[in-house]
């Protein structure tokens, strides 16, 4: 008899953004004449920039040319793109990386969950609360979460690190030591970005405890304040303890194209059951060559076009446009009397709701009364109750 992975039965409801989308669709069906401003899922709305489109067209032509056609590419990505990443995203900030430390993929969402293949199920996991739901759900599926406790809306084996108004949305070091620590900065959903000293605290903690940090910096391009680190590797010693996940999705409008990358430094080691040291970089390379056939040549050519003077200017224009939206949304809700966070170093605005107002209740009211769809804070974790996320991507 075929047995399923029972961990799936341990997942709660549906995936957050599918639920939000379904609710919006139901509302639109019931109110065909009402226009909904969609600030729920963080999906980009501006088209790809000109440079990217032109490069992708050229790459298409190559694929139709018998002398230039390409079949399977390298699983870890083409060097032309990985070299650009090393130069433009890291060397420019004083970070030395080797091209073999960069792995191109079809999305940070896939990478942050697939990376768990490399780690034992008995590792203890810490997540920020609220958090991008993929971190938690993929650990539930992988059998690391323990059972769900309805009473506190938490999984028994997960360490939840509240990131709330009281600690300025910066989690405290947990009392119980985790093996895997997820950090997202600039943060989805709270919009808060970690300062250098805060990041250093985590790097030192991970070193001391032989833990690993999964650092999701998919929104680094939205940082506007000068003193905020863009990469965890700006902190000395971080290469020994952190994997960094980046994406072209929000930076260059690739949510429908699919391209991202993950950085795994050679210094990063894990331990086998026998206590031997193992290079994580090598394990991921092995994993990817077994389970992944790389991102299309056309897509990688498009991504590489971002790293040209013109391409960079074009994506920066789009990012500035979204950040102008963020400012408008912030101001609008401040005027209405809300406490508003985020929207300065991130494309997400995080509203504090009036005492006693649940985030799903607010979702319904905002949709009904103003035709604005957002995402209820509680969908990102129990500490998100009483908050509400608005995305700056939805207005074009
Ligand atoms: C979000 O709305 O949080 C993101 O768009 C989801 C994602 O990037 O997968």
Image (spheres, rainbow, N blue to C red):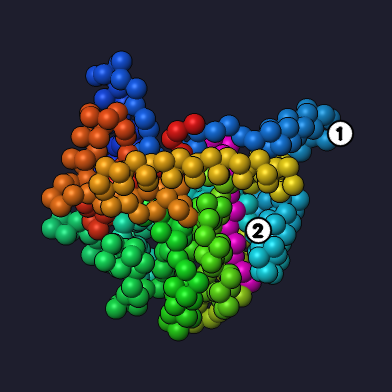
The quadrant of the image that shows the N terminus is top left
Left or right: 324 as drawn, with respect to 237: left
- Nearest the eye: 320 or 240: 320
In terms of sequence position, does the residue under pointer 2 or pointer 1 come before the other? 1
Which segment is the magenta one?
Answer: 252-266
Q: Which residue is mark 2?
A: 89
From the viewer's perspective, is residue 216 above or below residue 269? above
Picture coordinates of residue 214, whole percent (x, y): 47, 64
Marks 2, 1: nearer the viewer: 2
Q: Which residue is mark 1?
A: 67
Picture coordinates of residue 122, whole percent (x, y): 36, 70
Where on the picture, by quarter, is residue 116?
A: bottom left
Q: Is mark 1 within 8 Å of ligand 1?
A: no
Image label count: 2
- SS assignment for the magenta stretch, majority: loop
Q: Residue furthest right?
A: 67
- Nearest the eye: 220 or 255: 220
From the viewer's perspective, is residue 236 above or below residue 217? below
Picture coordinates of residue 207, whole percent (x, y): 48, 81
| Within-10-Å neighbours for mark 1: few <14, some 14–19, many 20+ | few
Q: Residue furthest top?
A: 33
């Amino acid at each position: 008899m075929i047995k399923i992975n029972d961990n799936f039965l341990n997942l709660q409801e549906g995936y957050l953004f599918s639920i939000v989308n379904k609710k919006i669709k139901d509302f639109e069906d019931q109110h065909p004449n009402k226009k909904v401003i969609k600030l729920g899922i963080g999906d980009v709305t501006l088209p790809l920039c000109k440079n990217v489109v032109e490069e992708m067209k050229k790459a298409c032509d190559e694929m139709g040319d018998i002398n230039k056609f390409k079949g399977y590419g390298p699983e870890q990505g083409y060097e032309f793109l990985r070299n650009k990443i090393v130069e433009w995203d890291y060397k420019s900030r004083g970070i030395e990386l080797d091209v073999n430390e960069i792995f191109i993929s079809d999305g940070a969402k896939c990478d942050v969950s697939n990376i768990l293949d490399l780690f034992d199920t008995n590792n203890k996991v810490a997540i920020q609360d609220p958090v991008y739901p993929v971190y938690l759900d993929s650990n539930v599926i992988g059998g690391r979460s323990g059972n769900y406790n309805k009473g506190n809306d938490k999984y028994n084996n997960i360490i939840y690190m509240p990131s709330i108004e009281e600690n300025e949305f910066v989690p405290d070091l947990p009392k119980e030591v985790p093996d895997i620590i997820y950090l997202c900065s600039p943060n989805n959903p709270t919009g808060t970005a970690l300062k250098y000293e805060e990041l250093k605290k985590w790097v030192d903690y991970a070193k001391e405890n032989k833990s690993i940090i999964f650092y999701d910096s998919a929104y680094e391009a939205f940082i506007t304040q000068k003193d905020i680190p863009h990469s965890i590797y700006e902190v000395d010693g971080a290469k020994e303890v952190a994997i960094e996940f980046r994406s072209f999705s929000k930076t260059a409008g690739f949510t429908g194209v699919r391209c991202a990358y993950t950085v795994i430094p050679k210094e990063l080691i894990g331990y086998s059951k026998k206590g031997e040291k193992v290079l994580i970089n090598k394990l991921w390379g092995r994993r990817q060559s077994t389970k992944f056939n790389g991102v299309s040549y056309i897509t990688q050519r498009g991504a590489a076009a971002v790293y040209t003077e013109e391409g960079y200017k074009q994506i920066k224009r789009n990012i500035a446009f979204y950040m102008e939206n963020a400012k408008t949304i912030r101001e609008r809700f401040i005027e209405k009397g809300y406490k508003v966070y985020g929207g300065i170093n991130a494309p997400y605005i995080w509203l504090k709701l009036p005492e006693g107002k649940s985030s799903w209740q607010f979702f319904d009211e905002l949709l009904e009364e103003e035709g604005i769809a957002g995402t209820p804070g509680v969908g990102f974790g129990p500490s998100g109750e009483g908050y509400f996320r608005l995305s700056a991507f939805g207005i074009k």
